[in-house]
Image (cartoon, coloured by chain):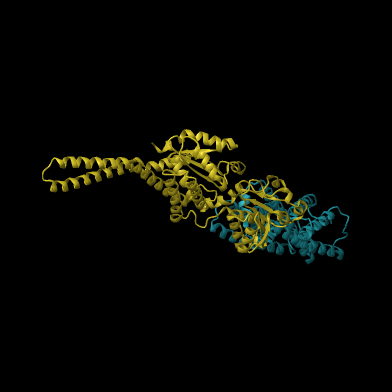
Chain colours: A cyan, B yellow
Amino acid sequence: MIEIEVHALATLLPVLYLIATFLYGMELGGPKAPKFRAGRHVVNGILLVVHLGWLLLLWQSLGHFPVADPWTAVSFMALSVMLVYLPIELMTGAPTTGVFVVGFAFTLQLIGSCLLPLDLSPSGFARSPFFAVHVATALLATAALLLSGFFGALYLVLLRQIRAGRFGVLFRRLPDLESLSRLNRGVATLGFVLLTVGVNIGIWWAHSGAVERLDYTDPKVLPVLVLWLLFGVIGASPWIRGLTGRRAAVVAVLGASLLIVTLIVTFLPLGSIHEF
Amino acid sequence: MPLARRLVLLGTSYRTSPVEARERCAVAPEDSAAALRELVAAEGHDEVFLISTCNRTEILISGPGAEAASETVRQRWFLGLGVQECYAYHGTDAVFHLFRVAAGLDSQVLGESEILGQIKDALGRAQDAAAVKSHLQPLVEQALAVGKRVRTETKVGEGTLSVARAAVELAAKVLGRLDRVDALVVGAGETGQLVAKHLRDVGARRIVFCNRTLERAEAAAREHGGEALPLDQLSKVISEVDLTVVSVDAPEPVVRLEHVDAARIRRRDRPPIVIDLSVPRGVDPALAAHAGMLVHGLDDLDAVVSRHHEERRSEVALAENILVEEVHKFLALQAYATLKPVVAGMRARFEEARDAVLGEIDDRELVAALADKLTKRLLNEALTQIKLGTREAFSQERLGETYRQYRERS
């Protein structure tokens, strides 16, 4: 019975993400109607409740934190993007970047829902509570790092447009350069902290006997360390002489690109970030 | 003589030419007397009005040969200076254009009222040079009255931007909250002070005034709560601040590449922005090539002001109705004024005829009173008919159509 509800909600989720993307799109390019704004808040609320409810159902069904296969991980990633982005939107009061962010979350959720296996089977090692903390923090960190790269890219695009005197729709609707720079550094710092927690819990958990062998020379571990360093540097960039807003944005874009490549290279062939 | 043959307006503005072209034909206030004298001395027209602001240079000429003389003026004051985009409005179109300019409908910042002061000053200079007389003086005065009426009866100028405020808004788009911003205002004139006022209103952390005359910079600093520096110390501060607004009246750029400490700029977390509100330009174009700086001019302010244009579209329609009404009134009065000698002649002939008839009658007292009343009644009737005829000749509906055609052409 639960499995039917799980698959029904998995079908509903991309629809909710699509509606949210549309409403954010209206904020960027459409009329500034209050009904769209109110509708967006309602849809965001429903979306979070449904997505969290779906995870709880999965948790109940599997008996462990429900992110042990690639497609539930992709779906959790979509939720992580929303969980990182929505407080930023509330703090800055600038929802115009939302169409890109929520659009990205929609794409992730669509992939997750479409490729979700019909027969969900529990995973042995996923029953540990450390696994839940490790995976949740690592995926939230990934979402934050991707958003940092996204805000960095927006900063560079806007700077380029302003320099060239092209004052189009992006200039009118996007937050100012300074805000984009602060967003880039803010989410990079959040990602750095989450990654620190996630990676260390993972290492501690691995050494406690959860896995047979953790190889630090594994080429997949290196990019994570590089990313950890890169985003730490971005977070600390206001205090690093010469690491200007533009350079921090360039580093964030490079870091996010490295993260995407790492995810694609490791995730798709192996079905997991780790080989064990 | 028809208005179309005695009134021509030539000009170039931000709508047709970039600032690089506009600065070539700009006439500084101190040079306008000489320019007006030169224009009046030319053949073909006997009255001239010249207005030159940061956004436009326009010359209005009136006289029997204005149409023919306009080509010489165009060559000398626009084409000869390398400004190819020169517009020309004749007769009623010229009146429409002048009234639109005074109403702020042709301004880069829609509805701004600075233009009224600029027209008033230009009229004063033209009067001093004896360049405006019976034709252009009432026309320009009427334009000023129209400008005031449009601002009183419509909301086109309500809460409007000025060029100074548009510059501050543009800076905010780059720098975000301006209360964390250090600003440099180069030039302590009217626009510079307006920029400082807006910066103070948004709580700018530090405002430094730099002016050729230190006393003026100090006066501005006292008024707006900032610091003052002479112009030769510009390089000390320009690389320190986040925002530099330049509003000077100088033939050559006062802010140049050598004033900037390139290494220091490269190390800055956010790119400093320089906004030039001067015509001729006060910032060396070479500075725009500096990788670490964002340099913008008057033409870039369109991005900020276009949003305000959209918001005021309905008010523009109301203002345009007033414009057509006022042009109608003005043309009717002008036509009536041309009939004044005819009316005076008619009055004299009527009275002559009355006296001649009275000379032939014996009972003079009664008949004189009758003849006098009849003369006045007939004369009034004739004058009323003439006035009506004049108004009909310039019917408001027809003028509305003429205005639409003028807008399509402009």
Query: Quadrant of the image for the N terminus of chain B?
Result: top left
Give the percent coordinates (x, y) of residue B239.
Answer: 73, 55
Q: A121 and B197: which one is in front? A: B197
Q: Which residue is drawn at 32% across and 43% down?
A: B340
Of residue B346 and residue B111, the one placed in the foreground of this image is: B346
The reply, left or right, for residue B80 in relation to residue B358 is: right
Work out which residue is located at the far left of the displayed protein and give it.
B362
| Residue A251 at x, y percent in the picture | 77, 53
Residue at x-position 55% and y-position 36%? B76
Say which of A97 and B223 sits in front: B223
- The number of numbered badges drawn on the structure is 0
Query: x, y percentage for residue A11?
Result: 64, 55
Which quarter of the picture shows residue A217?
bottom right
Left/right of residue A256 with respect to residue A33 in the rendered view: right
Instruction: Report whether residue A43 is seen.
Output: no
Measuring from the top left, give residue B382's x and y in whole percent: 25, 42
Q: Is residue B123 visible?
A: yes
**In this picture, is B406 found above or below B188?**
above
State which quadrant residue B65 falls in.
top left
Would residue B122 be found to the left or right of residue B363 on screen?
A: right
Q: In which quarter of the image is residue A70?
A: bottom right
